[in-house]
Amino acid sequence: METIIKWEELSPAIRNEFTLDGKVTLRHWLIDGRNNNNSKLKGFYSKEVVNSMMEKIKNKEVSYYGSTDTELYKLLEKNDIKNKKVGILGSTQPWYEAIVLSYGGIPITIEYNSLKTDDERLTLLTVDEYSKNLQKFDVVFSISSFEHDGLGRYGDPINPFGDFEAMLKMQDILKDDGLLFLAVPMLMFMICEVITPHNTTDYVKAIDLKEYYYKYHRIILGLACTLQVCLLGNFFVFYAEEYYSVKVLGRVIMLITMLPLIISANRRLHEIGMAIFFVGFIYTIIKYHIWNVYF
């Protein structure tokens, strides 16, 4: 197996593209997600493990992504994938292959790592293998996959624009009337790309984030309100949520709390509002990412 490429080995031009000419703060953190050829278990999807996962899915249990799986179950109950070819973009364990099988679909995995299986229900292709025999799918799963493309973590080529290019390729992978199940850390992208201040050579002074928030609170909270409105629309259009469900009421309360903060510059009011948001955040983490996963 080739050695993983480290940051110091990249050309200055590539490094500048990753950091937007130095505007993005760099933190060194190397993760090697490639399959180890010396391991007999990593990269092997056994039928026994797949069947075990299907039993958990039957009971609506969730895996690493917690509430993402819960929402995916709801969508699959409303959108039939039985006997349809389902492309799974990126895979480190056969969880989403097991979900597709549980709902009657035919999973076909496309992954940079080479995967093996003893389960005849699975088709596991490397990116190179798929490129030699292109096909379009009725349904595609991309669960926390696009944002990794181009970083080299899973054996993919180093490419500062790998995520954008991966998204563009969807027109060659998904049928025109196909269905894409997409999950990405949207809020994190919004915070990183829009809200947080960038250090540049012209602005080397230490940034006081608290003062930065008060200065730009209308933009920050305006974006947050826009996100909540989009989530409300998502609930009604795709999930047919009841108007008085906990999820809908929670979003409405957040909007009601945020609107005065957009208008007012009163710091005490903002502190109270942030305290309410913090309590809601802790509740969400416990309910959907701890309780649902472990209990």
Image: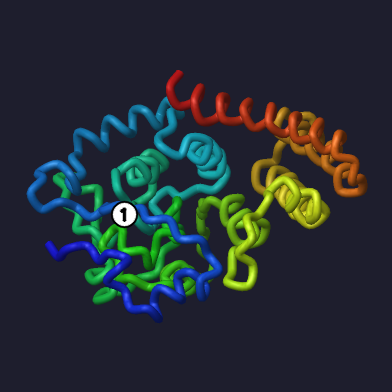
Q: Please say if 84 is above or below 268.
A: below
Where residue 113 appears, x then y in whole percent? 23, 58
Task: Report if residue 3 is visible in the image.
Answer: yes
| Residue 71, quarter of picture | top right
Q: Which residue is mark 1?
A: 30
Amino acid marked by disc 1: Leu
Judging from the image, the colouring scheme is rainbow
Viewed as shown, does residue 75 lie left or right of 107?
right
Residue 4: image x %, image y %?
22, 62
Residue occupying the point 31% across, 73% down: 10
Residue 30 shown left or right of residue 165 in the figure = left
Between 165 and 195, the residue placed more toward the observer is 195
Furthest residue in direction front, as rendered = 205
Q: Which is nearer the eye, 65 or 240?
A: 65
Q: Residue 66 in the image: state x and y as whole percent.
A: 48, 35
- The residue shown at (24%, 48%) is 121
203, 105: nearer the viewer: 203
Residue shown at 34% from the left, 41% from the top? 95
> In the rendered view of the protein, which quadrant contains the C terminus?
top left
- Secondary structure of the residue carrying tag 1 is loop
Q: Is residue 175 visible?
A: no
Circle 1 Cα neighbour tier, 10 Å, few/some/many (<14 / 14–19 / ≥20): few
Give the position of the N terminus as an image quadrant.
bottom left
Please tell me how many numbered marks the rendered image carries.
1
- Answer above or below: position of 188 versus 15: above
Q: Report x, y in % for residue 139.
A: 45, 58
Relative side of 76 to 6, left or right? right
**For residue 197, what is the image quadrant?**
bottom right
